Amino acid sequence: MRVYLVRHGQSAENAADLKRLIGLEDFRQLLEHAQHSPLTALGREQAANVAEEIAAFNPTRLYSSPYIRAFDTAQIIAARVGLPIQTINELHEISAIVPFLLRRERVRLLRTMYIRGYLSQLIPHRPLWGETWWVAQRRVIKAWNTMLEQWSPSTRAVVVAHRAFIWMTLRYLQRHGGWRIVRRSTENAGISELESI
C-alpha cells in the first residue's frame, strides 16, 4: 500500500505579500475567506506537473480537501489519471486563530499575524474562531482512519491537502508506526510518499 500526500499548487493566499501591513479585522477577514483562495497561474502549472508525476504511480484512489485550491489541484490530477475525486471535509486546512492579545488599532506585518495566529493555537483554550492544534490533530487522525478503512494492500492513494495537514499526518505516522516515509515535501505541489510496512 502506498499513499501520496500532495500539497495543493500555489494559491492566491500563498502568493500574498507577507511584508504588507494588515490590521486585525483585515486578518480575520483573510482567514475567513481562506477556503476560497484559488490557484494562481503558477499553481495551475504546478498542479499539471504534479499530475504527470502522479500518473506514473498508477493511483487507484484520489481524495481531496474541499478547499478550492486543493480541489482544483485534485481536478487537474483527476483529469490526468482518470479517477473520481472523493472529497473529505476533515482534510481541510488548519486555520490560524485570530490572535486574541493584540490591540485592534495596530497594524502589523501579515507574516507576524500568521505567526501569532498559529502560536495562539498552542494555548489549550476554546477559541472564538479557528481550532487549536489538539483539535486539529484529532481531525487529522479521523481523516486518516476514514481513508485507511477503504484501502487494501494494493491501494495507491493520492490525498490532496494542505501543508499543516500533511505535516501532522507525517508526525502522527512517525509516532505510531506501520508506515515508512519514502520522501517528504510540504512545498506547493510537493509530494510526501508513504509505504505501509
Image (spheres, rainbow, N blue to C red):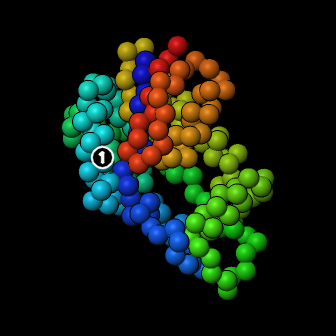
Q: On screen, 66 above or below 97?
A: above
Q: Quadrant of residue 152?
A: top left
- Which quadrant: the N terminus? top left
Which residue type carries mark 1? Ala
Depth check: give the residue in front, 158 or 19: 19
Q: On screen, 39 above or below 134?
A: below
Q: How many discs appear?
A: 1
Left or right side of 79 for 106: right
Query: Residue at position x 37%, y 23% from top?
Result: 156
Q: Which residue is mark 1?
A: 47
Rate crowding at label 1 as few (under 14), some (14 to 19) or many (20 or more) other CA atoms within 10 Å.
many
Q: Quadrant of residue 104?
A: bottom right
Residue at the extreme front of the image, as rendered? 19
Measuring from the top left, give residue 55's x and y in whole percent: 25, 30
Q: On screen, 43 above or below 111?
A: above
Measuring from the top left, give residue 72's x and y in whole percent: 32, 51
Q: On screen, 129 above or below 78?
A: below
Q: Quadrant of residue 53?
A: top left
Query: Residue at position x 62%, y 76% from top?
Result: 108
Q: Secondary structure at mark 1?
A: helix
Residue 151 visible? The answer is no
Measuring from the top left, give residue 93's x and y in whole percent: 52, 51
Residue 45 visible? The answer is yes
Depth check: give the residue in front, 145 or 197: 197
Query: Residue at position x 55%, y 29% from top?
Result: 145
Measuring from the top left, give residue 197's x and y in whole percent: 52, 13
Left or right side of 84 for 172: right
Residue at the extreme bottom of the image, as rendered? 105
Query: Residue at position x 35%, y 29% from top?
Result: 61
